[in-house]
Every structure is written in structure tokens, then in C-alpha cells.
Image: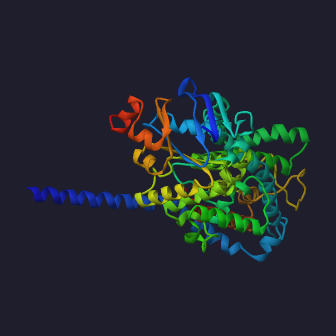
Amino acid sequence: MHQKKLRWRIIKDRAFRGIVVLLAFLSMLPLFLILFYILKNGLLALSWELFTEIPKPVGEKGGGISNALIGTFMLVCTAGVPAIFLGIAAGTYLSEHKARKLAYWSRLGVDVLQGTPSIVIGILAYLWVVVPMGGFSALSGSIALGVMMLPMIIKSTEETLNLIPYSLKEASLALGVPYYRTILRVILPAGLSGIMTGILISVARIAGETAPLLFTAFGNAFMNWELSKPVNALPLLIYNYATSPYAEWHRVAWGASCVLVGFVLMMNLFARVVTRKWKMQF
Amino acid sequence: MENAILRTQDLSAYYGDNQVVKNVTVSIPEKTITAIMGPSGCGKSTLVRCFNRMHEMVPGARIRGKVFLEEADVYEMDPITVRTRVGMVFQRPNPFPMMNIRDNVLAGYKLNGVRLSRSQRDEITEHSLKEAALWDEVKDHLNRRGAFLSGGQQQRLCIARALAVEPAILLFDEPTSALDPKSTAHIEELMTELKKTVTLTLVTHNIAQAGRVSDFIAFLYLGELIEFGPTDRVLTTPKDKKTEEFLTGKFG
């Protein structure tokens, strides 16, 4: 009797373990399928031309995505620099003054902003920047993307700094180091790996955003280096080309997808390396 | 006290409405070790944190009364100046994890933006580490981060860091409570050595430790200074009944 019960329990135990492994595998399946399709279709489209040429008119063979690459780079940089500074500053405030009223409300604001659909942020950038400026521009796209980056950087900074023991701050203050230097030279460097990870992940996120760019950066068939003019971006190019009826454009869209996914993947892997290598032990 | 380097006058400390230190008047004699002793929660740590104005870093904390360092009112001085004159070593070793051993020792200069020449840097590093009895163990690893050091070595690194800025007085806030007996013995030995050059204040709830290293004992109970006197006298013939009860283990 006892033996039988025990065997039944062992069987249940094994079955449970099997299900857990299966589910873990299933959760990875979508990623592998996406990667497989993109690589299958995209790798063929990759060529030197793709990176150096601008798109060609319908009917002509070849053409590349160089304008979209430059555009995405411009958008991410212009969005990133102010968002990183503001985000780290706000995250530091939230971690330093946890209990203040202002902290409570800004934390709520950050949560809501993080949950705001990106298309809504795009509309706001349209109303606030595109309309007053009288036209689509890279700048308006950057502002929309920067607003999307902010909550991610604020959150990761706040959470990273919350993990830094108070004793470290005490050590610095007790040496007569002023508060602002303690924050800049002890607390932020100690949290560098977490903050960097947040930045990399948020860059990866916004590089692939399409919705906020639809009526801000708008897209551009030509090369553009000016912030005040419409600019092409990888996701915009993919959106426009994939929905077009031309087989040649589909090919370019696959190539661009491949490049974009490759970039996002690389950023994420890089973030992992940063987390592991720069991790502080307290 | 003839050579008091630091003294308080009717010092009270509060966290919000909660008074933790009550009208303490005490003098710390120069180049001695004064143990501040008492049961947990009696305000020992808070008292010494008023000496270097670390108490005020806690939101809602305030003080009443006066603290004098070499007859200058500490609360009239800039807190940054006070803290370079009154060093502190904490319960848990807290070296800076992103700095190597040398930079940890020089942190008081580096973080304050003081520029030192190469020879000054080497000299201060060597001198401070020797004073903290750590030089021989780390002299070949000065460019490595301190994470590989043992707890006791890390605590001595923190002592070296505090000594490097040449404070007039060093506050030890239960410096051995996170260490094993061997490291504790090492730190205690170091303290007796250090009092030749610097005044030490030791917060401890360990009677034996106070007996081993201190010259004077201040006994605190519920925020009040119950008794102050030479260690031998306080430990053998306490004047106050509360002190006697604490020493005989009736509470604590």
C-alpha cells in the first residue's frame, strides 16, 4: 500500500517536472519562429548595397536603406541624450526622497506614462511640435521617442539606486564629501551597471517603435541630415514597404527587419554583459 | 577634564518627537579611548553621530544643546569641515566597491576633489595603511578592488580611509559587531596602537571590549548619561546602581 502510494507520487513529480520544462520551451518558441522567418527571408536581402544606397523608385532593382539607418540613428541619439539626463536625474530624486509627496505623484506619473500607448504619444508630439513647427520633422519624432524612453530610464535608475546600501552613502558623507558629490561620484557610479542596462534596453525598445513616428518623423524617400525635416526610420520603412504591393520592396523590408532585429538583439545581449561585468558587490 | 578635545553641553537629540539623547554633558579626553557603553537602543550611536553631524542626515532628526570640537562650536561650523576633522568607522565595513584599494584609502581626498601629487598619494596610502596595520597584507594588490578582502581587512581598510584625512578624533560605531573573534582582536589591538596619535571614541555594548581597550567609560541608559569615569573605576566600583546592574548582566 505504502509502496504504491510512493510510486504514484514519484510519477506525479516527474510529470510536473516535464510540464514545466515543456512550458519553458513553448515560451521560447515564438522568439525562435520570428528569428527563423526573419533570418530566412532577411539574410538573402542583406548586401553591401542595402547599407549604402537610398531606396530606388518602384520598378527599379536594388536600392538600400541607408537613409533609414541614418534616420533611426539620428532619432535615437536626439531622443536619448536629453532622456538619459532627465531620466537619471528623476530616478535619483525618486530613490533619494522616497516618501515625499512630489515623489509619490511623479512615480504615479511615470507609471501612467509607461502605460500610455505609443500612438497617443505620437499624437501629442504631432499636436505640440509638428503643428506649431508647420511640418513633419525628425525633431518631433525624437521628442515622441524621448518621452517613451523617459519612464524606462527613470524606473531602472530608481530601482538600481534603491539596491545600493545606505552604508555606502554614509561612508562618503562621513568623509566630509558634500551631498551632490556623494551622489555623482559614489552613488551613481555604484549603480552604473543597472543604469546602463536600463539605457540599452530602452534604446532597443524605441529603435523599433513605429506608431509615434507615423505622423512626426513621417518618413522620407531621400537622405536627410536635418532635424527640422522629415526623416526615414527603419520601422517606418518596414511598415511602408511591407504594405506595398511590390515584391522588390518586400525584399528590402525583410532586409531592414533583419537589421533591426539584429540591432535589438545585440543591445539586449550587450545589456546582459554590462550587468554581469560591471556588477558591484556591496 | 583638562585636555578635552571634544565636549558636549546639555546635548539632546531627537528623531521627530522621539528624544533619544537626553541632556548629555560629557568631555572626551585627548589621545585616549573613550567607550560609550550601554544596552541596545540607549542612544549610543545617536550620541556619536551628533559629534560629526551625521545625525542630521536622517529626515526629521534634530538636536538641542552644543558640541564643541577643540572649543569651536560644531554646529556653527560647516558640516563638511566637521566631518573631515571627526572621522567615523561604521558597524559594517563599507569600502567603496567601485574603487581599488589605493583609491579607497585616498577617497577622502579624491571625492572632495583635492589634487595630490603622485608622491603625496603614495605617501598617504602607505602611511595610512601602515597605521591601520593593513599595509603588509595589501601592498602588492593596491590596484585591485577590495572585494577579495576579508571582513576584518575591509574594516581596517575603512580605518585607513578615515585616518588618511588626518582627523582629530575617530568615532568607532560598534566596529567589530560584524566581525569574527580573530578580526575583532586585531582591530582592538590596532585601536590601542592608534590612540598614540588620535583620539578614539568607541561605541560598544560589549563590556569586555570596553574593559580591554578603553581608558574612560561613559555609561548611557535610555538616552541619559548615567556615569562617566576611568575604565578601571567604573568597571570595579560603579557609583550608580544602574551601571552596576548593567555590568552584572541584570539587563542589556
Looking at the rendered image, the quarter that the C terminus of chain A falls into is bottom right
Choose between A146 and B200: the one closer to the eye.
B200
Residue A53 picture location, percent across and down = 84, 70
Q: Quadrant of residue B113?
A: bottom right
Q: Please name the residue shown 62% across and 33% down the image.
A: B8
Q: Is residue B113 visible?
A: yes
Residue A164's place in the image compared with A70, above or below, is above
Q: How is the image coloured?
A: rainbow
**Residue toward you, A230 or A63:** A230
Q: Residue at x 68, y 31 (%)?
A: A102
* In this picture, residue A85 sits left or right of residue A191: right
- The correct choice, above or below, for A228 with respect to A105 in the image is below
Please tell me which residue is depicted at 73% across the width and 45% down the height of the picture: A178
Count numbered badges in the picture. 0
The answer to whether residue A115 is seen in the rendering is no
From the viewer's perspective, tell me whether residue A167 is left or right of residue B81: left
Q: Is residue A98 left or right of residue A9?
A: right
Q: Position of residue B169 (x, y in %)?
A: 63, 47
| Quadrant the N terminus of chain A occupies | bottom left
Residue at x 85%, y 41% (from the top left corner): A129
**Where on the picture, by quarter, is residue A34?**
bottom right
Farthest front residue in view: B2
Closer to the camera, B160 or A119? B160
In the figure, A224 relative to B46: above or below?
below
Give coordinates of residue A147: x percent, y percent: 74, 44
Whole-percent x and y of residue B217?
49, 40
- Extreme residue in the left direction: A1
Front one among A124 and B177: B177
